[in-house]
Image (cartoon, grey):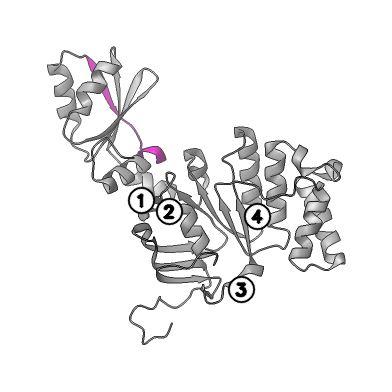
Amino acid sequence: MTSADPGAMPAASDDIAIRARGLGKRFGALTAVDGIDLDVPRQHVYGFLGPNGSGKSTTIRMLCGLLTPSAGQIEVLGLRIPEQAEALRSRIGYMTQKFSLFDDLGVRENLEFLAAVHDLSRVQARRRIDELLVQYRFQDRQKQLAGSLSGGQRQRLALAAAVIHQPELLFLDEPTSAVDPESRRDFWEKLFELADAGTTLLVSTHYMDEAERCHRLAILDRGALVADGTPAELTARLAGRTLVVEAAEPRQAARVLATCAGVISVAQIGNSLRVLLDAGDAQQALADALRMAGITARLLLQPANLEDVFVAATRRHAGVDGEGA
């Protein structure tokens, strides 16, 4: 990348851990990732939110040098990827939802093996493993086989293994999809401890409550980046476009509202309906449509949440009204 290259990325900044421009990946006729531009700040928990098949995993594999892009440029921790992927590997960690552990090895044995893979000396390995056993609450389970651990325990051990070499950048590809809500909350506390200690984290998820925890968030759909910002910025963009409709017959009201112009989605939440609009001036038209259908209802403006953001971004990208998210 030289200044004479018209497609070159801007000069690297010390506060940006990952920068990608025009990133794309094709598998034959299938475009898995389509022209993504991305900036991930250092020491942030940066979230990738998207449905299955949206390109999250493919993007992560390209960013960490495991998959060669079909188009675009990547710079990670100041290194050009994939050209300098080998130099990057010692500076990053990678954890997937499959928790790559050796089931027939004990907790400490798993960590010792990973320490050897990362070329830690015996003294370094012993000191680091002792730290992790305390930090991830395995002091009394050092000899327990990994295969006999609970899902949450396996998750904690997999995270300890991913950070044994104290990486500057940690990639986590849907790491909480196989564990219970309490374990997920505990896991996220560990992630913020890592961020506070200086690690940059890129986490893919399809859980809205996890997305809300991120410092910054990118929403992917069908290989494209359809929204990017802090959770507060993303929800603020939908100001005036979310309604709660209280009606005695919510299912009948939902059928009426779904046919109204300007309605992106109607979802029943308990005995109420949550309605997402494509503009903020349709409230009176909806009230009129319900009244004409003989339905008494109360319409209340509500602050948007990330689920609203997700639905608005993905359905707008799909080019449909009420389908395709």
Residue 313 coordinates in the image, percent (x, y): 32, 46
Please state the extent of the stretch shown in magenta in the rendering.
296-308
Q: Residue beneath label 4, please?
A: 194
Q: Is residue 238 visible?
A: no
- As for residue 303 lying within the magenta part, the answer is yes
Label disc, if present, on residue 86 of the rendered structure: 3
Q: Residue furthest bottom?
A: 4
- Residue for point 29% across, 17% down: 250
Tell which circle, 1 or 2, labels the residue nearer the N-terminal end.
2
Badge 2, how many Cα within 10 Å: few under 14, some, many 20+? many
Tell which circle, 4 or 1, labels the residue nearer the N-terminal end.
4
Q: Residue beneath label 1, please?
A: 222
Front one among 224 and 244:
224
Tag 2 secondary structure = loop
Marks 4 and 1, how far apart at CA: 31 Å
Identify whether 107 is placed above or below 287. below
Residue 241 coordinates in the image, percent (x, y): 27, 37
Label disc, if present, on residue 55 of the rendered structure: 2
Nearer the observer: mark 4 or 2; the answer is 2
Q: Is residue 169 visible?
A: yes
Which amino acid type corresponds to the residue marked 1 in the rendered image?
Arg
Front one among 286 and 124:
124
Tell which circle, 3 or 2, labels the residue nearer the N-terminal end.
2
Which amino acid type corresponds to the residue marked 4 in the rendered image?
Leu
Which amino acid type corresponds to the residue marked 2 in the rendered image?
Gly
- As for residue 90 lying within the magenta part, the answer is no
Tell which circle, 3 or 4, labels the residue nearer the N-terminal end.
3
- Cβ–Cβ below 8 Å for labels 3 and 4? no
- Cβ–Cβ below 8 Å for labels 4 and 2? no
